[in-house]
């Protein structure tokens, strides 16, 4: 924990900010990262030394937070303009405050034990972390010191010490997030003053920003301004917020971390002014001390699993707190860049909607029995209440500003001749209607919850807003009236922002997708056919199912009525729940629901079944049916499935020439390994795009990705999008955003705008950037790599009888369910094994032990074998010339750089009792080492990610703190699994969950 830090001089490029009088002087240099908190040896937080490992080049002095300040001037003259130094200063200050807080509330003895553990971890890292045989003796001694310190702690001390490391990583993350915004602001200011051109300077001129992509496309010679404009006006990214439980930090702590970032911004603003009264500085410093003090005194753990309703509100809160303001602000900047780059006539159209937002929270019932039809009804109504509240507030602000007496004839006709302030009168009726909309939704909510008030007045749906168009038309009338009366600037203020938000969020904030697994629909239709005396639908072959489904879709006769199954014991509870879900869909008003996603989809009948069940339930405008292809076999068969559907006239008549298909990245990787899965995903998208084109269907892919590489994630979003197969995105991109990634990408206005910028730039660049398609030789080679890697992966995970005992004992997988970060069970089938385990806890468990097995297992075997064959040179050429393959390999290299087999071995030594399982652990770590060598060989690197200074600095900073958390966690797991006292077990469970949070914060992701 950084309680006192003395930084040694780090040679960096100095930029004289005073030459740029128009910019804020706190910004950061060039493309230096905020993770440059520290130099490799001297810039880490430190406690007072108490162990044998005090001989470092640190000046280990405790610095009381009474004197800690964000405004301390301790920089040398040569470093005064080193902007990255402000980050190091921020972290130093916060570390000092945290240290003083720990001593005040936990005592000096705890403080010293934390420092002893950290110094041992530092010494272990300095001596090679088990990778340098020449330093083995000193390395082993350092690691033993870590383990001995952890073993000497009482159960309560384990928890307290784990909290110290967890909270330092969390506040360091907050400083990093803020520094990214600080860096972008500097780059933007530098751009505004460096090229001598009068530019809008609305976005940074980076390769992954609209500020860089648009000029690059225009100046490349092949694209006209009109073509780029057309792309930007028609492209759309839909971000689907999901309830996947990967955010380990409580919302109350996230709020405090957000306030810390706000305080850092305030400090930057004050510094940019030059001389500032000490009183103002003290206000900021005291605010920071207050937040860190409250963080330490807060309970960092969820004490119960959230309800689905709570999960939905928590997950979409980012829309209300950040995106409602960030999105229109970003679109205003995009408009400025378009005009500046393309020309005055190329302004973003009023009706353009580059972004939409949806949610799975409250609609995703796959394997989650807590998502009932009534729960979905409730979440839909709550979303309407929240949207109407936001809209009502904005209209109130607009009314307060629009005191003008001039308006168009059309608007005057609406309000009458006697209205002194016509806009206020006009808006007043809209506000009243929104208030009624809220009251109506609350009454509906009370009815669902059984809290109906008999004296409540009945509200006619004709008196409220049910569709986006109803309100949008009225706002547009006001917008055009302002324009027509010479008030264009006023129209393009808050009124334009309101229109932008209506286009993106509508009246439902985040429309819900409904998701259910295919077997539930089969079970429902099986019950119906048996009830009707038609036999067992489940036992029919595919041809029979398709024939019957087509006949029923063509018939106007209902299969069953609600009265047939509602109280009929012939229908099981799960069948009733399924049928009630479709009944619920039929009741929803416009825009409440979005799509119906079928997980574990394998056949054409899976899709027709959902379409039939919707129509039979009376859904007037059936939700689009989206098959989700997840496993390797499902991906390989996806094109044939969709080809069958596209040849069925009854289906073609229902889809209107449009189809959405979801690609599952998580389960396919869990099924076949990362390399085989990524190739299957690539080929599947190519094949599906070809089938859709052949049948004249407009195809949109929905990408089900997680935050980690093992679940399809890629921290470099721009490069990840350009790595997709050519002609598969075409300006339409739907993707999941989940768990910790929602906060990381959208938790702050500046970060949210940058994320939106990257997505917009990537989708535009993808459409107009020539990228090579794999040659016949490369495809043959990829098939070979895929086969080898899949076989090697499954040989361990599926076929080795030692694997399950090893996995269950060497990782905290069994204990993860106690984390209470999501509403759904960790398994689809409570009695199943690893195969039924969801992809998130599967990845989560391996991330905690730093082995990261799902991402790299099988990759090394494939690369090594091909490199040694006659195809070795072709493989090297493929890596160098084909960006998609290189991106895949580079991601594996990044994960290997973050992995630590010595830490994984420690878990084995402490936790694994079965000798055969231990033998497997040794074999897996041997494969890990061989994979490292193979990947480095192919990339022609001597060290991991040697060209990525950012990642190397991140790892230098974080590794010692995560190492400590790992050693603590292994000790906690050992005691917990042997504990017989309920009282001590409760303390150890808390300690374990704290350590899990700390490791997740240190690694930057979970599942």
Image (spheres, rainbow, N blue to C red):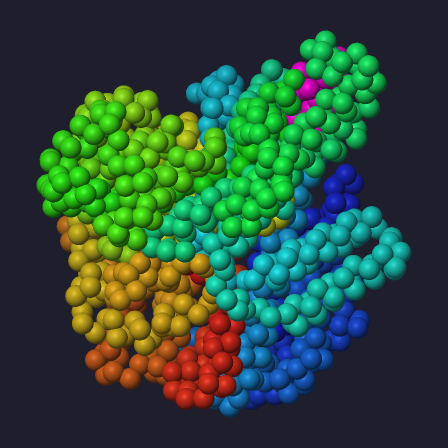
- Residue 920, given in percent of the width and then of the height, sits at 23, 75
Question: Of residues 531 and 970, which is closer to you in this image?
Answer: 531
Task: Tell me, yes or no, if residue 218 can be seen here.
Answer: no
- Residue 786, given in percent of the width and then of the height, sits at 21, 50
Say which quarter of the image contains residue 941: bottom left
For the record, the magenta segment spans 478-497
Task: Tell me, yes or no, if residue 252 can be seen here.
Answer: yes
Q: What type of secondary structure mainly makes up the magenta span?
A: helix
Say which quarter of the image contains residue 749: top right
Question: For the point 63% across and 42% down, which residue is it?
Answer: 455
Residue furthest top as drawn: 409
Tell me: residue 839, above or below residue 292: above
Tell me: residue 429, above or below residue 238: above
Residue 747 belongs to magenta span: no
Question: Of residues 753 and 467, which is closer to you in this image?
Answer: 467
Q: Is residue 740 left or right of residue 278?
A: left
Tell me: residue 354, above or below residue 360: above
Residue 487 belongs to magenta span: yes
- Residue 369, given in percent of the width and then of the height, sits at 37, 56
Question: Of residues 89 and 840, which is closer to you in this image?
Answer: 840
Tell me: residue 993, above or below residue 983: above
């Amino acid at each position: 924990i950084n309680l006192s830090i003395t930084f040694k001089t780090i040679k960096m490029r100095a930029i004289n900010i005073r030459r740029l009088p128009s910019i804020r002087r706190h910004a950061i240099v060039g493309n230096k990262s905020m993770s440059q908190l520290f130099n490799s040896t001297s810039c880490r937080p430190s406690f007072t030394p108490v162990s044998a490992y005090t001989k470092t080049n640190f000046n280990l002095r405790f610095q009381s937070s009474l004197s800690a300040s964000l405004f301390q001037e301790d920089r040398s003259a040569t470093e005064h303009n080193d902007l990255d130094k402000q980050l190091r200063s921020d972290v130093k200050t916060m570390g000092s405050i945290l240290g003083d807080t720990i001593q005040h509330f936990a005592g000096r003895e705890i403080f010293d034990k934390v420092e002893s553990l950290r110094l041992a971890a530092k010494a272990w890292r300095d001596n090679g972390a088990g990778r340098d045989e020449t330093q083995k003796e000193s390395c082993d001694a350092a690691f033993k010191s870590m383990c001995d310190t952890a073993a000497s702690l009482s159960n309560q001390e384990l928890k307290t010490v784990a909290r110290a490391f967890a909270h330092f990583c969390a506040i360091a993350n907050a400083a990093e997030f803020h520094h990214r915004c600080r860096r972008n602001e500097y780059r933007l200011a530098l751009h505004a003053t460096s090229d001598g051109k009068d530019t809008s300077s609305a976005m940074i001129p980076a390769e992954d920003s609209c500020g860089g992509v648009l000029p690059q496309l225009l100046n490349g010679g092949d694209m006209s301004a009109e073509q780029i404009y057309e792309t930007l006006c028609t492209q759309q990214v839909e971000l689907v917020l999901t309830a996947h439980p990967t955010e380990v930090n409580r919302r109350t702590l996230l709020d405090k971390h957000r306030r810390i970032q706000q305080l850092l911004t305030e400090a930057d603003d004050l510094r940019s002014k030059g001389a500032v009264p000490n009183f103002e500085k003290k206000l900021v410093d005291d605010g920071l001390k207050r937040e860190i003090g409250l963080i330490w005194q807060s309970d960092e753990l969820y004490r119960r699993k959230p309800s689905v309703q709570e999960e939905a509100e928590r997950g979409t809160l980012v829309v209300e707190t950040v995106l409602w303001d960030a999105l229109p602000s970003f679109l205003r900047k995009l408009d400025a860049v378009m005009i500046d780059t393309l020309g005055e006539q190329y302004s973003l159209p009023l009706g353009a909607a580059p972004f939409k937002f949806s949610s799975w929270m409250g609609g995703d019932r796959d394997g989650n029995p807590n998502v009932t039809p009534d729960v979905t009804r409730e979440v839909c109504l709550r979303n309407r209440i929240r949207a109407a509240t936001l809209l009502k507030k904005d209209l109130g602000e607009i009314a307060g500003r629009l005191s003008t007496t001039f308006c168009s004839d059309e608007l005057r006709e609406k309000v009458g001749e006697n209205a002194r302030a016509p806009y206020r009168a006009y808006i007043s009726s809209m506000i009243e209607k929104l208030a009624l909309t809220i009251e109506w939704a609350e009454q509906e909510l009370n009815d669902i919850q059984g809290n109906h008030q008999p004296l409540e007045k009945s509200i006619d749906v004709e008196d409220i807003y049910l569709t986006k168009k109803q309100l949008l038309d009225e706002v547009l009338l006001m917008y055009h009236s302002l324009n027509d009366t010479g008030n264009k600037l006023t129209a393009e203020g808050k009124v334009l922002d309101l229109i932008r938000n209506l286009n993106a969020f509508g009246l439902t904030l985040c429309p819900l997708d409904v998701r259910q697994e295919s077997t539930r629909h089969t079970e429902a239709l099986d019950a119906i056919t048996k009830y009707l005396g038609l036999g067992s639908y489940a036992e029919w072959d595919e041809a029979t199912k398709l024939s019957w489904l087509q006949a029923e879709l063509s018939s106007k006769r209902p299969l069953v009525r609600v009265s047939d199954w509602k109280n009929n014991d012939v229908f099981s509870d799960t069948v009733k729940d399924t049928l009630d879900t479709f009944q619920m869909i039929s009741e929803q008003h416009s825009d409440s629901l979005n799509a119906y996603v079928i997980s574990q989809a394998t056949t054409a009948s899976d899709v027709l079944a959902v379409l039939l069940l919707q129509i039979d339930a009376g859904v007037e405008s059936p939700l689009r049916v989206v098959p989700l292809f997840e496993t390797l076999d499902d991906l390989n068969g996806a094109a044939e499935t969709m080809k069958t559907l596209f040849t069925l006239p009854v289906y073609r008549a229902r889809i209107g020439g449009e189809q959405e298909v979801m690609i599952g990245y998580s389960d396919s990787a869990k099924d076949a390994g990362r390399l085989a899965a990524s190739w299957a995903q690539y080929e599947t998208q190519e094949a599906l795009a070809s089938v859709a084109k052949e049948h004249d269907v407009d195809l949109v892919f929905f990408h089900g990705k997680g935050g980690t590489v093992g679940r399809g994630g890629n921290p470099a979003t721009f490069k990840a999008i350009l790595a997709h197969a050519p002609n598969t995105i075409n300006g339409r991109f739907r993707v999941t955003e989940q768990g910790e990634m929602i906060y990381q990408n959208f938790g702050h206005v500046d970060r949210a705008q940058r994320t939106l910028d990257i997505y917009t730039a990537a989708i535009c660049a993808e459409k107009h950037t020539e990228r090579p398609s794999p040659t016949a030789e490369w495809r043959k080679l990829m098939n070979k790599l895929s086969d080898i890697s899949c076989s090697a992966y499954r040989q361990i995970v599926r076929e080795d009888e030692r694997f399950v005992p090893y996995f269950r004992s060497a990782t905290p997988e069994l204990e993860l369910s106690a984390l209470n970060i999501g509403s759904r069970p960790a398994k689809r089938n409570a009695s199943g094994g690893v195969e039924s385990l969801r992809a998130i806890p599967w990845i989560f468990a391996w991330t905690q032990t730093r082995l990261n097995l799902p991402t790299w297992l099988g990759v090394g075997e494939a690369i090594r074998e091909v490199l040694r064959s006659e195809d070795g040179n072709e493989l090297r050429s493929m890596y160098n010339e084909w960006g998609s393959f290189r991106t895949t390999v580079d991601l594996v290299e990044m994960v290997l750089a973050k992995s630590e087999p010595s830490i994984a071995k420690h878990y084995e030594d402490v936790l694994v009792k079965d000798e055969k399982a231990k033998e497997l652990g040794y074999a897996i770590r041997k494969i890990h080492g061989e994979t490292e060598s193979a990947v480095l060989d192919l990339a022609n690197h001597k060290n991991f990610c040697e060209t990525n200074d950012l990642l190397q600095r991140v790892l230098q900073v974080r590794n010692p703190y995560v190492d400590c958390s790992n050693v603590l966690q292994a000790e906690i797991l050992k005691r917990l699994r042997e504990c017989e006292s309920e009282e001590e077990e409760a303390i150890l469970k808390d300690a374990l969950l704290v350590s899990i949070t700390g490791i997740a914060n240190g690694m930057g992701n979970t599942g």
